[in-house]
Each structure stands twice: as structure tokens, then as C-alpha cells.
Image: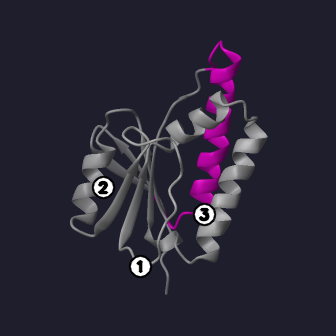
Amino acid sequence: MHFVFGGAFNGKRKWIKKQYDNQITAWYSAYENPIKVPTLVKGDQYIVIEGIERYIKELIDSGKTVEEVCCYFNEQLQAWRAEDLLANIIVIGTEIGKGIVPLNQNDRSWRDACGYVYQMLVAEAETVDRIWYGISNRIKEDIKE
């Protein structure tokens, strides 16, 4: 899995399109489609899931606790691992906190859930890049031998 994160409107989508050129066969965006983590099909070259923070926000807004959201994403990661899909997935997340604590409890829960889910994604990902103003900073790269 490749996890790409950065600030809003900092060029994450453009950077991924440039990096993966014509290898992306499916692009799921929480900004354009109903909020739902897609069912993935093995065999696609690369599958992009964009706006993971929006998926998390929808779960928090529906009344799920931070713990329930984390369990949901942990189960999703396990399913992708079991189906041998992780190497084909690119997840894009927007940094939503930068250390600022929201006054609203629901927004704090969203920020906390994003932090925990992003930690899970980073732990599972082979590659992690932070995009800031269109410039990438490789944070993690596990090279398979």
C-alpha cells in the first residue's frame, strides 16, 4: 500500500497521477461518490482511495465512536491483506489537525480517529509520502527483496 497525505489543496492528486501515470485503473473519491470504502477487485493495477478523512468523518457523524471507527478500518485492512490487495492500493488522506484541538467534541473525535487510522495506514503501508505544495517528502519506503 502507498499512503499519501498532506494539506488540503497541496497537490496530492496531481502528484499521484504523475507518479503512477496510466497504471491507475480505479479511482474512488469521497469527494465525488457516496461515502463508502469501496470493494476492491484483485487484478487492478492500482486502485486509489481518495479522501479517507471524509470516510472517517461520515462514520463519526453517524454516531460511531473513535474506537468503532478504528475497528472498522482495522477490519478493512485485514480484509485487503487477506485478499492480497495491499500492494495495489494507494490511499490519499488530508492532514486535518496539525496540532490544533477543535472546540467541538465531534470534530475532536474526527481528528482523533483520523490520527489513529492514519497511524494504522502508515504501519501497513510499504511507502508513505507527504505532499506539501506539490513537493513530495518520502517518509517510509520498505524495499522488498
Q: Which residue is mark 3?
A: 124
Numbered circle sitting on residue 43: 1
SS class, disc 3: helix
Relative placement, left or right, of 99 versus 24 is right
The quarter of the picture where residue 44 lies is: bottom left
SS class, disc 1: loop
Residue 22: image location, x then y, percent: 21, 67
Relative placement, left or right, of 121 versus 45 is right
Which span is picked out in magenta?
A: 101-128
**In the displayed structure, would residue 17 be above or below residue 97?**
below
Q: Is disc 1 surrounded by few (<14), some (14 to 19) or many (20+) residues within 10 Å?
A: few
Disc 3 marks a residue whose amino acid type is Glu
Q: Residue at x 58, y 55 (%)?
A: 121
Relative placement, left or right, of 2 versus 133 is right
Residue 126: image location, x then y, percent: 51, 68
Q: Nearer the viewer, residue 119 or 21?
A: 21
What type of secondary structure mainly makes up the magenta span? helix
Disc 1 marks a residue whose amino acid type is Gly
Q: Is disc 3 surrounded by few (<14), some (14 to 19) or many (20+) residues within 10 Å?
A: some
Q: Are marks 1 and 3 in contact (CB under 8 Å)?
A: no
Residue 124: image location, x then y, percent: 60, 63
Asked whether the viewer can see residue 20, the reply is: yes
Q: Are marks 1 and 2 in contact (CB under 8 Å)?
A: no
**In the displayed structure, would residue 103 be above or below residue 126?**
above
Asked whether the viewer can see residue 142, the reply is: no
Disc 2 marks a residue whose amino acid type is Ile
Q: Which residue is mark 2?
A: 16
